[in-house]
Image (spheres, grey):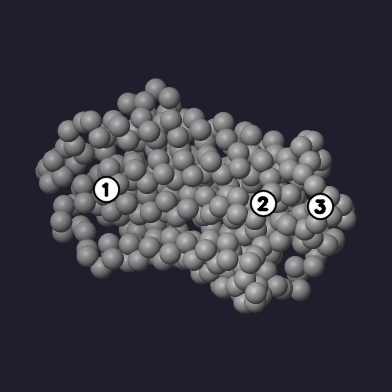
Amino acid sequence: MARHLPPLSTITAVFLLFTVLVHGRRGGSGDGSTSGGTSDGTSSGTSSGPSLHFPPGWDGAAFVIAIIATIFLGCLSIVSIQAFFMYLNKDPPHLFSQQPVVGEANTGQLFCTLVVLSLFSLTAYFPLFMVFILRDGAGEHIPRTLTYMVIYLGHAFAAGALLALVSHRRHLHFGREGTSLWKKGLDLAIIGFMITFIVIWTLSLLAALPYKRRSQALDVVEAMEHLRVAFYCLATIDIFVSAAFLWRRLKAAGICDQAISDLCFRASYFFISLAIFNIIEDALKRHFPIHHFTNFMVLNFFSTLINAVCCFFGLAWVLRVYRRKLGFCCYGY
């Protein structure tokens, strides 16, 4: 078996606890700019006007990371589109064949579709984020809200894709007896609630600015953000518990499924790290006493870095099953 990656969840927690929790009010050194504010866009600080100069400090580092992430995620998007059309145009093997289908590029049409949607959303997020960095935090309210909605939807589509992958591989190897109705219902409910909370979060935030009782609208925004994070963590647990049980069942049956092995032993480090970061970020940017000691420029930098690394490598590992078909996709060795 291939060597495992280091536990990035531990690295994530250590970096955040010792770097993000620094003294200083929101906005850094007092220049009146939040340089992107919180990730839900509820506050943008004050600024004398848009500025297009290259951002200094932590914002400049986040800008560079966003450029690199756009390039790499754009390349991975091309891979996912190739995989989508590959699966769409080929004759899928019989699902109930006595011979297990191993090593073939068969991850299910739903998985391919959701991966394309996820990578499209994630790739679109980073250029939009760079625009607000260059404008020195002076972006309009509506574009800022839609920018962060894009990455939240990218997370939801990625979680849905992984659940679809596990369900499809279980069905592929074990047929109808390997698929339970309640499990499909649970998967659909978790992803459905995530998307619902994202929609409510977006509409509530768009309505908060002109709303007369703005504090009440922002309370709804905060509640929806908590629920989104909670259901994303539930989806992450559901994905890897389901994948682990399926991997053990395949091992007992003497079947080596590369897609499930990569999901359990490689992609899991990245998606679990991302879920842990979502919890820490949600706690840091809310109305806790720690809020006044959080440097949000540092938080924005780590948000950009962790989202870029975890989303790219996590989705790259599960797309690795196509490596024999796509010359572009020979990573991970």
How far apart are the two marked residues, 3 and 2, measured between alpha carbons?
12 Å
Image x and y of residue 218, in percent:
62, 71
Location of mark 3 (residue): 47
Q: Are marks 1 and 2 in contact (CB under 8 Å)?
A: no
Task: Identify the amino acid type marked 1.
Answer: Arg
Mark nearer the viewer, 1 or 3: 3
Mark found first going from the N terminus, 1 or 2: 2
Task: Identify the amino acid type marked 2.
Answer: Glu
Task: Name the one closer to the observer, 35 or 85.
Answer: 35
Mark nearer the viewer, 1 or 2: 2
Location of mark 2 (residue): 140
- Residue at x 75% of width, y 69% of height: 290
Location of mark 1 (residue): 169
Q: Is any atom of residue 259 visible in this view? A: yes
Where, by quadrant of the figure, is residue 194 drawn? bottom left
Asked if residue 300 lies left or right of residue 238, the reply is right
Asked if residue 33 lies left or right of residue 188, the reply is right
Mark found first going from the N terminus, 3 or 2: 3
